[in-house]
Amino acid sequence: MIVFDLSCEHGHRFEGWFGSSDDFAGQQARGLMSCPFCGSAAVSKAPMAPAVPAKGNATRNDSGLGAAAQVQALANRPMPPEVGEALARLAKAQKKALENSTWVGEKFAEQSRAMHYGEVDEKPIHGQASTEEAKGLIDEGIAIAPLPFPVAEPDKLN
């Protein structure tokens, strides 16, 4: 099995599991894929970083590259240094924001409402919500914000 990061024409990102690259291409050609968020059939592979594990004795930043250079190493074409630096700052800010946050998965909307209406104590949470769920939370006056980068479920991390 191979996992691809996919995206639709509206920018929604999600994963797809396929038997091979040819299997992905065949399903795409036959129009068998659609975005789970909006239903769009215009689905393509999204840029993704290779899943290369670090050596057992290496630390995460043994590359000697600065954060902006690390982001550039994942791009498929040169980007202005300011963009790489901005992405690196965003990634660092998101990491810091999630340090004390609890993953609630698909129960994000439910948990957000429960905290907003005083049913449970407030605490930082992050998870998944459909576009409709997010719009509903906003309409109810519940403060939410999208994360700039996708977050893997804790139990699915390598």
Image (spheres, rainbow, N blue to C red):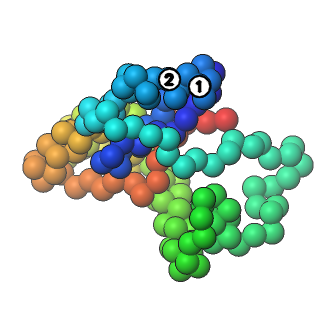
The residue under label 2 is which amino acid type? Answer: Gly
Badge 1 local density, few (<14 within 10 Å), some, or many (20+)? Answer: few
Report the quarter where the N terminus lies.
top right
Residue 109: x %, y % from top left = 25, 38
Report the residue at 60% width, 60% height from top: 75
> Residue 46 shows which numbered tag?
none
The residue under label 1 is which amino acid type? Answer: Asp
Q: Residue furthest left?
A: 139
Callout 1: SS: helix
Residue 97: x %, y % from top left = 46, 59
Q: Where on the picture, by quarter, is residue 154?
A: top right
Is residue 91 visible to the viewer in this orientation of the structure? yes
Task: Reply above or below: 50 against 81.
Answer: above
Is disc 1 in contact with disc 2, using a CB cutoff of under 8 Å?
A: yes
Report the quarter where the C terminus lies.
top right
**Horizontal side, residue 102 vs residue 51: left or right:** left
Is residue 118 visible to the viewer in this orientation of the structure? no
Q: Is 123 in front, or is 155?
A: 155
**Horizontal side, residue 52 vs residue 143: left or right:** right
Disc 1 from disc 2: Cα separation: 6 Å
Residue 89: x %, y % from top left = 53, 71
Which residue, given by chain and number where applicable, does mark 1 sit on? 22
Callout 2: SS: helix
Residue 77: x %, y % from top left = 59, 65
Report the residue at 22% width, 55% height from top: 143
Report the residue at 53% width, 58% height from top: 95
Task: Reply above or below: 121 against 156.
Answer: below
Which residue, given by chain and number where applicable, does mark 2 sit on? 26
**Horizontal side, residue 117 vs residue 60: left or right:** left
**Horizontal side, residue 75 vs residue 108: left or right:** right
Q: Residue furthest front?
A: 29
